[in-house]
Image (tube, helix red, strand yellow):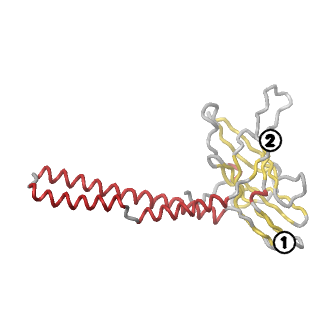
Amino acid sequence: MRSVRTLLASLTLAAALPACGPSYFLTMHPSSGSGTWANGAEIARQQHDSLEVRLSFVRYEASRLIFEAELRNRSGHDFTVSPTDFYLQPVATQPVASTAPAPVLPGRLTAFDPEPNIQELRQRIEVESAEATKVSAAEVLTSLSHTVENVAAIKKKETKEQISARENRQQNENASFDSQRLRAAAAAEQHRAQLGELEGQALRRTTLETGRAVRGYVYFPRADMADVIRVSAPGLAPGTTLDFTQTRTQQH
């Protein structure tokens, strides 16, 4: 649907919060940066039992947060990782002197599994590609009716105005079928681009052999009212998280 876009992860411009309230710009950066950067994004890093996890924020989408995760297996055994092994815990910090109630946030959120979406996109592409090339029964019948109508028009000795009206109507009817095919072709192309991004960018279930690494996007639901985003990654010690600070700046 959209081509993959490179954004500065530490200074990402987000969509506004719900229209009924004030509008904000949102930014995200590691709470304790590693000092290591990649493609403009600072990386949060944790390690446990010779498994290293690196995480950087990529961008906001309408309903999702996108992180890029990299896992490196330096242990003596294979390790299988899946995007649904990642969890996000939104946290709202409360100033000591504040009397305002803390926002109600969702509990632990699991990262999206891209596989159902990938399968759905493949099916849509197959259906839409077929729609973009096929000639429907309705179009065949319409074409036959045009032929019959044109033959009958010769016997009727139509006026120029009648001929023009008939030809324009038939052209419009033919154009509507062409338009349906074009819309299906455009939809197929749109979904093909979206599928290419998911297949090429999303982290998918992978077995890491010793000495191997894997990298890919991990998708979470947005949590705009959180001040801290704590991400739990597979293979880390219990209670260990990769923390990001989310800042809201009100628009003027």
Mark nearer the viewer, 2 or 1: 1
What is the total number of numbered labels drawn onto the structure image? 2
Q: Going 25% across and 58% down the picture, which residue do you hit?
A: 145
User: Image quadrant of residue 151?
Assistant: bottom left
Residue 193 relative to residue 165: left or right = right
Give me the C-alpha separation between circle 2 and circle 1: 33 Å
Looking at the picture, tell me which residue is in the foreground, 221 or 53: 221
Q: Residues within 10 Å of mark 1 (few under 14, many from 20)?
A: some
Instruction: Please identify the quadrant where the N terminus is shown.
Output: bottom right
Residue 40 image offset from top left, x and y in percent: 69, 57
Q: Position of residue 28 (x, y in %)?
A: 72, 47
Q: Nearer the viewer, residue 186 or 12?
A: 186
Packing grade of label 2 (10 A; few <14, some 14-19, many >=20) is many
Q: Helix or strand or loop: what does disc 1 sit on? A: loop
Is residue 24 left or right of 72 when viewed as pictured? left
Contact (Cβ within 8 Å) of mark 2 with mark 1: no
Residue at point 30%, 58% (across, down): 174
Residue projecting furthest to the top: 99
Query: Which comes sooner in the sequence, label 2 or label 1?
Result: 1
Please tell me which residue is depicted at 65% across the width and 41% down the height of the picture. Answer: 25
Determine which quarter of the picture holds residue 247: top right
Specify whether 54 is left or right of 171.
right
Q: Which mark is residue 78?
A: 1
Judging from the image, what secondary structure is the residue with disc 2 in? strand
In the displayed structure, 22 sits above or below 189; it is: above
Residue where numbered disc 2 is placed: 91
Q: Is residue 250 above or below residue 9?
A: above
Residue 88 position within the rendered picture, expressed as x and y whole percent measured from the top left = 78, 49
Q: Amino acid at mark 2?
A: Val
The percent position of residue 26, horizontal first and vertical second, equals 68, 43
Q: Amino acid at mark 1?
A: Asp
Quadrant of the drawing holding the C terminus = top right
